[in-house]
Amino acid sequence: MKTKFLFIIGLLFNYLVYGQDSLKMSWPKTQFIAFTPLKNEIEKVNGLTVGLGFGPKYTPNTQPNFQKVNGLNLDINPLGFLIWMFYDPSKIAYKEAYLQVNGINISAAGYFRGINHNGASLSMYNYGNTMNGILVSAITMDIEKGNGVLISGLGISAKELKGLSISVFNDANTLKGMQIGFHNKATTGKGLQIGIVNKSDKLKGLQIGFWNENEKRKLPLVNWNFKTKK
């Protein structure tokens, strides 16, 4: 079921893009206003992008053209909730970014893997690559790297997090900053955890919560570790 749904979503985006290609129109590489998903011929947008959002890339053997958006992106995709239910970022072939967004993103859906963002973002979900700035997601955020303030209603997961993470569930492989939530987990790093349950393997810092675990001890209320094992 999940595979079929992702296939349908991919076909939808491809139809919109290649359907426009069939018009045989010549598009400038830099535009002030563009509709999403972006045509492959467009390299840069300085101004406004609006539409169904930036399409996911499923083809593992073809590296797409790198594109850049500077300004405001408005995403009115009505399938946002369904995409969140079925999209699995861990199964996406692209590991490098194919799109850079600088500015403000307001989305009824969210980013897919391979998208970088600098600025402010408000979305239903966020599965982007590197996120810098103030990022807010209504449901969940699962990204490669996050720098800044990250806020999500249900959960935040990042391989590398520098800054502040606020959600019910926070998970970071490497943390340099602060986690605030019901359940906080960090594998390594430096910082502060505030929540009901705080867990870390090699975190140099302070834990404040009902139950706290680090590499040295397990304690209620307050736990600390300022000397990590080599």
Image: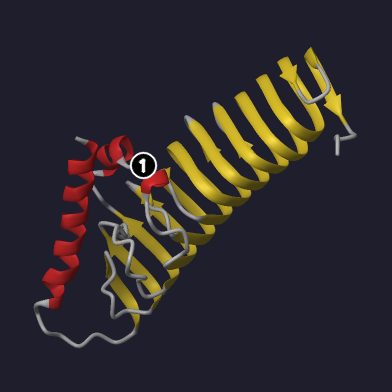
Instruction: Identify the residue at horizontal 86%, vertical 34% (top origin).
Output: 229
Residue located farthest toward the right when viewing the structure as drawn? 227
Q: Viewer-proximal residue, 94 or 162?
A: 94
Above or below, 214 relative to 12: above
Q: Viewer-proximal residue, 140 or 86?
A: 86
| Element marked by disc 1 | loop
Q: Residues within 10 Å of mark 1 (few under 14, many from 20)?
A: some
Relative placement, left or right, of 125 versus 208 is: left
On the image, the x and y values in percent for residue 177 come to 73, 42
On the image, the x and y values in percent for residue 202 come to 76, 34
Q: Residue 208's image quarter? A: top right
Relative placement, left or right, of 150 versus 210 is: left
On the image, the x and y values in percent for residue 57 come to 32, 60
On the image, the x and y values in percent for residue 14 come to 19, 63
Q: Is residue 195 visible?
A: no
Image color mode: secondary structure
Instruction: Identify the residue at horizontal 33%, vertical 39% (top origin).
Output: 84
Looking at the rendered image, the quarter that the N terminus falls into is: top left
Instruction: Identify the residue at horizontal 54%, vertical 38% (top origin).
Output: 157
Q: Is residue 189 visible?
A: yes
Q: Residue 43's image quarter? A: bottom left
The count of marks equals 1
Relative placement, left or right, of 166 versus 205 is: left
Q: Which residue is mark 1?
A: 88
Above or below, 179 relative to 79: above
Indicate the amino acid at tag 1. Asp
Q: Residue 41's image quarter? A: bottom left
Instruction: Identify the residue at horizontal 54%, vertical 50% (top origin).
Output: 144
Q: Viewer-proximal residue, 116 or 31?
A: 116
Looking at the rendered image, the quarter that the C terminus falls into is: top right
Q: Viewer-proximal residue, 11 or 165?
A: 11
Above or below, 7 relative to 34: above
